[in-house]
Amino acid sequence: MPRLPGGAATNLPPCPRAGHEGRRVVKDGSYGNPPRQLYRCFGEVVSPRTGEIRPWHHFAPAAPRVMTASGICDTCENQVHTHDGPLAGRTYAFPLREAATAFVGVGTGASYTQAGDRARVSARRQRLERERGGALVVEWLDLLGPTVVEHYAESSWPETLVLDSTRFMAKNVRTGKDTLAFNVLGAYGYPREGKPRVWKLHATHQARQQDWVEFLTSLDTSVPPRLVVCDGADEIRNAVRTVWPEAPGPSFPVPFVSRCELHLHRNGLEAMGADRIGGHLHWMRTRLGTAFLRWEGWDELVEKATGFAATQAWLSGISDFAPTQVGTRHLLPAHHSTAALDMALGRVRDFLDSRSFVLRNARRTNVTLALIRNHLNGVDIERDYYQLMRARLDDAGGRLPAQRAGGDKGTSRRVKRAKRAVASLRA
């Protein structure tokens, strides 16, 4: 085997066999595809088959590396020995860094096929024809994805919690009608200390009260938020009260459930439009701008709305909670709308809407949503993803979970039925 300039390699791994510390080690061929370096240790071993004593034996390091033909590091561009290539699992055909790159791509909206194709190009492997190759990234998401996303997952709820959801539709190819594919439940958090961020994204078929209860109880609920802001959906409000019941007493409940002031303002504009109140400088619209900031603004809007039927009807519809919300506003954290979460869910729609019909595996879709959340929060660093997977590789002695082991249960049942049908035909 040709050597790089500078003589023989001096950074060969030691033999892992007990009692062989300090024994001479040399390179001795390769194994696997792509090739990984194999080593020879000049230490005596007993053959398990014949019982003979052999003066040497082969071994592979616990964390194998793909051999590099160029002798140049792709990252730092320095010369390296052929055995110092990128880390990879023993049975994985791609280095771990390609999986990390693919996860960053999926988090920024790339499809599984696009991310898989880029991994093949980066690893200098043959590209697949047509829209194929997504299965590679699918398996990485199933087997390695949880290692990455669990590191960034939140464990408890913040001081201010914003809740909302968005739905994805899919066209039924038989009827031509749009049907519900799934909903994405979202949470944005404003912690007492630290940067506000997307707290959690979760895909579920429906967005019912029980779905929201499961969403909220997936994290520690022992310390409730002080404030929950939502758009007024009964499913969300009822779920919050189920998880954190309202305690009897004169003080307001914890958490306090507040309606989004941005939505209330828009609803007010619609009601005023029905009353033909036009122009942003109209005195009624000016009063709407202060109605949810303080008691005086609310009372003034209610008083001046006399004679405007649609506006009065709208005010009557929110009179059961609006006065309390306005009166306690100054006692609560200064977060009053769902705008930040709306923007985040809008990005999720941009990433997934065009291919929502193929996202049929809830577990895998939630891993994808967690990677998107990392991207929205600005923590999707390829180097960090790689380090997390490398730590798992080291802990597992170089053996990552076997691929083709993370299939969907529904698919598995179909495959089993197909196999039984083929067997019966052959019989």
Image: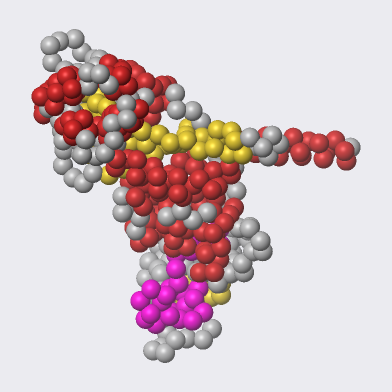
Q: Quadrant of residue 54?
A: bottom right
Q: Position of residue 60 (x, y in %)?
A: 49, 65
Image quadrant containing the C terminus? top right
Q: Position of residue 246 (x, y in %)?
A: 24, 15
Report whether 375 appears left or right of 407.
Answer: left
Q: Main secondary structure of the magenta part?
A: loop
70 or 320: nearer the viewer = 320
Q: In this figure, what is the number of numbered marks?
A: 0
Q: Position of residue 81 (x, y in %)?
A: 43, 79
260 or 370: nearer the viewer = 260
| Residue at 67%, 64% in the rendered image | 129
| Residue at 36%, 24% in the rendered image | 233
Q: Quadrant of residue 30?
A: bottom right
Image quadrant containing the N terminus? bottom right
Q: Is residue 197 magenta?
A: no
Q: Which residues are magenta?
A: 67-95
